[in-house]
Amino acid sequence: MWHYPTSMLAKTLTWIVIAIVLAAGAAGAGFVGGYEYRGSPPSSVANSTLSILAAGSLSAQFPQIAGVLVNETPGISAPTVTQTYEGSLDVVNAITQTGAKADVAAVADFRLIPQVLEPKYAGYEIAFGMTPEVLAYDPNVTAFDGINSSNWGWKLVQAVTTSGDPPFGVWNASTDPNGYNEIFSMELQGEFYNGSDLAVFGHFYTGSPTSLAVPNPTTTRAEHESQAAELIDTGVVSAVITYRSYAVANHLHFVSFNSTVGLNATSPAALADYRDLTTTIETASGGTASVGAAPVVFAVTVPSDAPNPELGAAFVHLLLSPQGEAILSAGGAFTSIFPGWADRPSAVPSLLAPDVVPMPAWASAELT
């Protein structure tokens, strides 16, 4: 749980939409059906430039989806310069603290939009994908020989405590959800396989897991998550905990976790395990906030002051289509959620209404 201080398009839409919806459920998440886009774009988005402000871990998929939209919608553009990918906490803080404007805002923690952006900066969110945490590692580090989902915690400790092996790469939990998610995965691994939440965590962070996360400088190297692939490829770090989507997109060696450890489980037992875990981060205002563990669910919105809200909605519509699903799921990166889970279905633009269903009860409970 977070404790944070702090149908116009339908009238102009002339696209022909062919529904080919094939719904299937998997662990509570909808699976792709879809739409094919044909015909002309709405005149209201002509000569517009799409702007995106999104989680850094979407930097492989969102530009591809934007490219498809540009190819299918004459008269619009989506240059690299109008797409910014950074930590999800940086995303929401840019909107609330510095007045950043974007047609699309997306985060790696579905709790952020309702609890930080709504109702002033956004009217709704749509959860569109899940991806678990994994350990991406350098296969040249011999300590990782024989690594698997049961022993990765011990293998990681062994690697960073072996003379000459590089440290473990960690992220800033105060700017990036992956920073606090890696803490939760380490705690859960210790509890499940080593008898203590400190068995893995205690080697890489000082103090209590519930306090402000302070990386141990002798075993860790604090870096920006976007550099993870380069850090591993060049031997600067031995391993990182990151999203499977990032590991797949960057062709990294990785080991999958137990689904609960990977923050990918939504069963009552897993959710109960998550409720027992918290850590502390610094807020943009200079204070601190307590953050709890939750399944990793990515979500998107069109901000209330988006320069081109209809174009933003068109991007989300494509994100929730077979084309979008194919890009998200390539190589097993994401498990797409279709229909998308909307926290406020009545507030989504009419174009997106067929693409969403109400959020599952367990997910809605995480937003309070």
Image: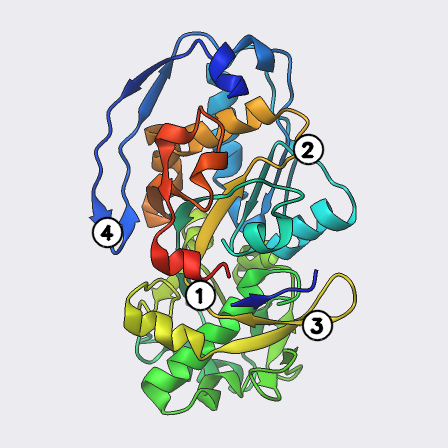
Q: Could you say whether the residue bearing mark 1 is in a helix, strand or loop?
A: loop
Residue tagged by mark 2? 305
Residue depth check, mark 4 versus mark 3: number of the one nearer the observer: 3
Q: Using the numbered discs, state the Cα–Cα distance from disc 1 to disc 2 in whole angstroms.
A: 29 Å
Residue corresponding to mark 1: 294
> Given contact means CB atoms under 8 Å apart, are the residues at marks 2 and 3 in contact?
no
Quadrant location of residue 189? bottom left
Q: Residue at x 32, y 24 (%)?
A: 35
* Residue 21, placed above or below residue 359: above
> Label 4, on which residue?
26
Q: Earlier in the sequence, mark 4 or mark 1?
A: 4
Q: Quadrant of residue 106?
A: top right
The location of residue 303, given as percent across then percent down, is 62, 37
Which tag, 4 or 3, sits closer to the chain's start? Answer: 4
Labels 2 & 4 near each other (Cβ < 8 A): no
Which residue in the structure is indicated by mark 3?
Answer: 288
Residue 93 can be seen in this image? yes
Point 33% across, 75% down: residue: 147
Q: Earlier in the sequence, mark 2 or mark 4?
A: 4
The answer to whether residue 184 is left or right of residue 359 is right
What amino acid type is highlighted by mark number 4? Ala
Task: Tell me residue 321's x, y (percent).
Answer: 36, 30
Task: Say few, some or many: other residues with alpha carbon within 10 Å of mark 3 (under 14 / 14 to 19 / 20 or more).
Answer: some
Count residues near mark 2 (Cα–Cα under 10 Å), then give few for <14, some for 14-19, many for 20+.
some
Q: Amino acid at mark 2?
A: Asp
